[in-house]
Image: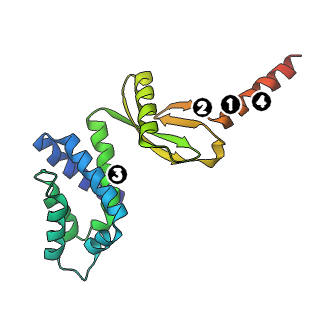
Amino acid sequence: MDSLYVRYSNALLSLAKDEGKVKEYKEAIKSLLAFFESDLEANTYLKSYFVSDEEKFILIDKITKDFKLNSLSPFLKLLVKKHRFNSFKYIANEFISSCNENIGISEGYIYSTTPLTEKQISDVEKAISKKLNQTVELSNCIDERLIGGIKVVVHDHVFDGSIKYKLETMKTKLNERRSNQ
């Protein structure tokens, strides 16, 4: 099933490139992903076998009319027609990753004990981007084992400012001092 997500993602990326609007498609897909995750009624409606495709297409046209992207509505209609809309979340995530790779953005994760605000995430993204000398986009993940602070992982780079890490570092240093005495 993985290759299905990749195929649909690659097809949409190809259309976005043809239009010269990769960033715009990425933002549109991110918006739609958030919309369908928050509006379960619309999500269920588009997956339903009891609603005609024509009725679903009307909803898709309403949802996508403000994006001004030629291939967005037909792409979503294709997912509905092929009964693949239940995979939209996975296709969208694959598409966003492909777009980031295409436009030179590195993806990573920022781990914290509580959800961070958009501003906090943005501030950390700016700092890490400067440190790595590349644009970084972070997703917030909750990890209660950290005790406090944050941990950022971008590919093979780990920036650990968590209390757990600091305690482990102190413990290691104390053990080294004991063994050196």
Label 3 Cα crowd, 10 Å radius (few <14 / some 14-19 / many 20+): some
Residue 5, given in percent of the width and then of the height, sits at 31, 56
How far apart in space, not on screen, are marks 1 and 4 (Cα)?
9 Å
Q: Is residue 164 above or below residue 40?
A: above
Tell me whether circle 1 and circle 4 mark residues in contact (CB < 8 Å): no
Tell me whether circle 1 and circle 3 mark residues in contact (CB < 8 Å): no
The residue beneath circle 2 is 161
The residue beneath circle 1 is 166
Q: Is residue 49 left or right of residue 62?
A: right
Displayed quadrant of residue 168: top right
**Residue type at numbered disc 3:** Asn
How far apart in space, not on screen, are marks 4 and 3 (Cα)?
40 Å
User: Can residue 6 be spotted in the picture?
Assistant: no
The residue beneath circle 3 is 93
Tell me whether circle 2 and circle 1 mark residues in contact (CB < 8 Å): yes
N-term mark: 2 or 1: 2
Residue 169, given in percent of the width and then of the height, sits at 71, 28
Label 2 element class: loop
The residue beneath circle 4 is 171
Label 4 element class: helix
Q: Which residue is rendered at x = 49% and y = 44% of the image?
A: 116
How far apart in space, not on screen, are marks 1 and 3 (Cα)?
33 Å
**Residue type at numbered disc 1:** Lys
